[in-house]
């Protein structure tokens, strides 16, 4: 079960923090049913969300929003149908392109993570309601404001606000209590994206993983992203070598190598650019 139960962080906006990956799942209550933010890693974990929802509402799920394409946020999608699933256009494309490869890769972790034992049962089910910049979605009398603010953790992260309250879901653009995951990231873009996110903060900020934060916490995370990007530029310019930069990084040296190498790859033009808009 969820480690801490559902917590109402704003008016009818609930968050449940699950021990596996220390992950936050959102439930925004509306007159026609809850909107679920992210669906976890496997069918079993998705069923756990549905079971846990009964403590706050008996209405069927009205809609789902995926914050980005990664398996721990989308592989439970199919269990929530026939509800519509919203996400960035590149989130849907990424699941179709990378989902099977991700399933195979994470299946290798099952001996150490038995919670993933039912990965083989996953039905890849990308968002069927997509957008690229910003969109407003009305569900059961509440308006959800979905926005892509730039590249960061991936090229398809979005934030979710609710027009009649102050809560903001940040997905994995922010992670509390641990080094953010940089493997698919764009470290040079991430600071500007989080700066745009900070401009939308009016109350509680729900990261993809870890404690719910506030504006001051977002500002501290922003400074770390800026420092990492600046170090990458210094290494690229020959002012520092990589080993020296690791010691100066805002994250533990053991965690900082991937983000610095990713920043250098971006500076060398080696990271993929988004496909042109259709």
Image (cartoon, rainbow, N blue to C red):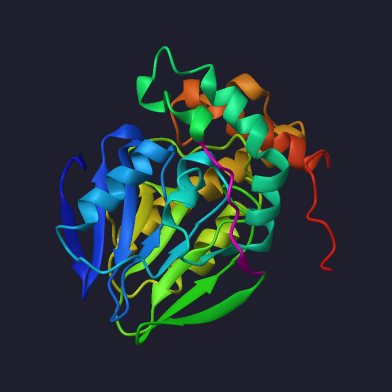
In the image, farthest residue toward the top: 111
Q: Image point 29% across, 62% down: which residue? A: 214
Q: Residue at x 49, y 80 (%)?
A: 137
User: Where is 78 relative to 127, above or below?
Assistant: above
Q: Is residue 78 left or right of residue 1?
A: right
> Which of the 4 image quadrants contains residue 147?
bottom right
Q: Is residue 171 visible?
A: yes
Report the magenta residues as a range.
122-131
Q: Quadrant of the C terminus?
A: bottom right
Left or right, residue 77 beside residue 214: right
Report x, y in % for residue 222: 46, 54
Q: Residue at x 17, y 63 (%)?
A: 56
Residue under the point 48% across and 51% down: 77
Q: Main secondary structure of the magenta part?
A: loop
Quadrant of the frame with the N terminus: top left
Residue 103, image x, y percentages:
58, 30
Find residue 202 and report its horizontal and vertical position in percent.
33, 75
Say whether residue 211 is visible: no
Classify 118 as above or below 15. above
In the foreground, 109 or 189: 109
In magenta segment, residue 254: no
Q: Position of residue 13 (x, y in %)?
A: 26, 69
């Amino acid at each position: 079960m969820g480690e801490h139960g559902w917590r109402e962080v704003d008016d009818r906006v609930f968050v449940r923090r699950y021990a596996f990956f220390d992950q936050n799942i959102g439930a925004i209550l509306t007159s026609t049913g809850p909107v679920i933010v992210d669906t976890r890693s496997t069918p079993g974990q998705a069923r756990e969300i549905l079971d846990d929802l009964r403590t706050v509402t008996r209405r069927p799920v009205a809609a789902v929003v995926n914050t980005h394409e990664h398996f721990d946020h989308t592989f439970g999608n199919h269990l929530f149908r026939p509800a519509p699933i919203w996400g960035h256009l590149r989130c849907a494309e990424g699941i179709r392109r990378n989902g099977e490869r991700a399933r195979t890769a994470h299946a290798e972790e099952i001996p150490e993570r038995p919670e993933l034992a039912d990965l083989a049962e996953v039905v890849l089910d990308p968002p069927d309601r997509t957008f690229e910049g910003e969109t407003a979605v009305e569900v059961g009398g509440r308006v959800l404001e979905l926005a892509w603010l730039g590249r960061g953790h991936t090229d398809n992260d979005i934030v979710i606000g609710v027009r009649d309250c102050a809560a903001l879901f940040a997905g994995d653009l922010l992670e509390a209590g641990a080094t953010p995951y940089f493997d698919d990231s764009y470290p040079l873009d991430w600071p500007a994206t989080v700066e745009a996110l900070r401009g939308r903060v009016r109350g509680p900020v729900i990261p993809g993983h870890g404690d719910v934060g506030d504006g001051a916490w977002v500002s501290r995370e922003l400074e770390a992203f800026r420092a990492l990007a600046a170090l990458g530029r210094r290494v690229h310019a020959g002012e520092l070598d990589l080993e020296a930069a690791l010691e100066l990084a805002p994250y533990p040296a053991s965690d900082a190598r991937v983000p610095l190498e990713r920043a250098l790859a971006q500076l060398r033009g080696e990271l993929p650019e988004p496909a042109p808009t259709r």
